[in-house]
Amino acid sequence: MRHPLGELRAIETADGSLSLHSDHFDEAFHSSTGALEEAEAKFVRPAELETFSQNSELKLLDVCFGMGYNSAAIMRSLPPASPPRLQWWGLELDPRPLGWGLGHKPFRELWPSGVLQRLEQLQRSGRWCDRGGHGSMLWGDARHNLKKLPGGCQLDLILLDAFSPVHCPQLWSEEFLAALASRLAPGGRLLTYCRAAAVRSSLRRAGLTLRSLLPAKGERAEWSSGTLALKPRTNKALAAEGPGWTSLSAMEEEHLNTRASVPYRDPHGDEEAVSIQRRRELEQQSCDLESTSAWHRRWRSHVLTNRPSTRPESDDKQR
């Protein structure tokens, strides 16, 4: 039987948490610095969960649920005294990673019993329901299943953790990102490890405000470790700096004016990776934007002079 992610191989990350490597995408599910630390730094902290109280609802969509680290870490970190009622949806292509995690004691021991029960219910039936809320998993192609969310549902958080754009451009296309942005409530946030100019430019064109995520503990200092994209609301602007994020630097802003910012396009939401990549390559060749290599050269000398531990580099392969 052919599985959508190909063969899966277990790996241990630097913080001791377990992860997987997909043979089909030739990529690990998580940063080598730590699966759990990545979930905390790139999804939990910038979500500012303390702003959700017992009298509110938290509507969350997890795109590429995988082993479940990101959602489980969010659930574990909700204010214990007065947690909001959680309405949760997950989009995932392959059920094996969750089953693999639940079959390993070190993974199970990371989570409180209530969170673990939710993961187990998702594995058994694709749903969970308890006094704290309810959740549903939609197995299959995320591009198609996004349309199955309840009509009019406005999300507070979207966790976007697909494989990198160079390997899975289907879930970083202009059209898919615009569809996600349209699902956000005013003040809602999309969080992702990805810093690619193509992705950020698409999110900005979808009307979202961008911030740059700071490195996770143990992660090599880079010019960015991910992206927070917020749907503006009229009465409250997003602070320039916050827990786990900062404003885009001049270097990052200029990156959005290079050929790296040419978007991935998937007009009908059904194309394969190779055709999406080819369309983008042709558009890059014909556009009059600055070359990404020129941006590299200009900022490399500046960055190496001022911050030797960082350097501008290709981001479409970034995990």
Image (spheres, rainbow, N blue to C red):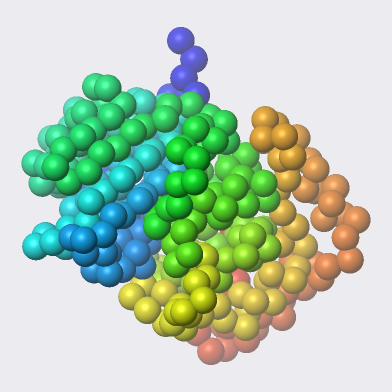
Location of residue 102 (image quadrant): top left
Q: Is residue 289 above or below residue 248?
A: above
Q: Position of residue 236 (x, y in %)?
A: 45, 79
Q: Position of residue 24 (x, y in %)?
A: 52, 29
Q: Is residue 51 above or below residue 275?
A: below
Q: Position of residue 38 (x, y in %)?
A: 34, 57
Q: Position of residue 77 (x, y in %)?
A: 20, 58
> Is residue 23 rendered to the left or right of residue 143?
left
- Marks counted in the figure total 0
> Is residue 306 rendered to the left or right of residue 299?
left
Residue found at the very far top of the displayed protein: 1
Residue found at the very far bottom of the displayed protein: 306
Q: Is residue 22 visible?
A: no
Who is closer to the viewer here, 231 or 210?
A: 231
Residue at image location 62% in from the left, 83% down from the top: 250
Q: Is residue 304 visible?
A: yes
Who is closer to the viewer here, 173 or 55?
A: 55
Q: Is residue 301 above or below residue 106?
A: below
Residue at image location 27% in from the left, 22% down from the top: 125
Residue at image location 35% in from the left, 51% down from the top: 59
Location of residue 168 (image quadrant): top right
Location of residue 65 (image quadrant): top left
Residue at image location 38% in from the left, 38% down from the top: 90
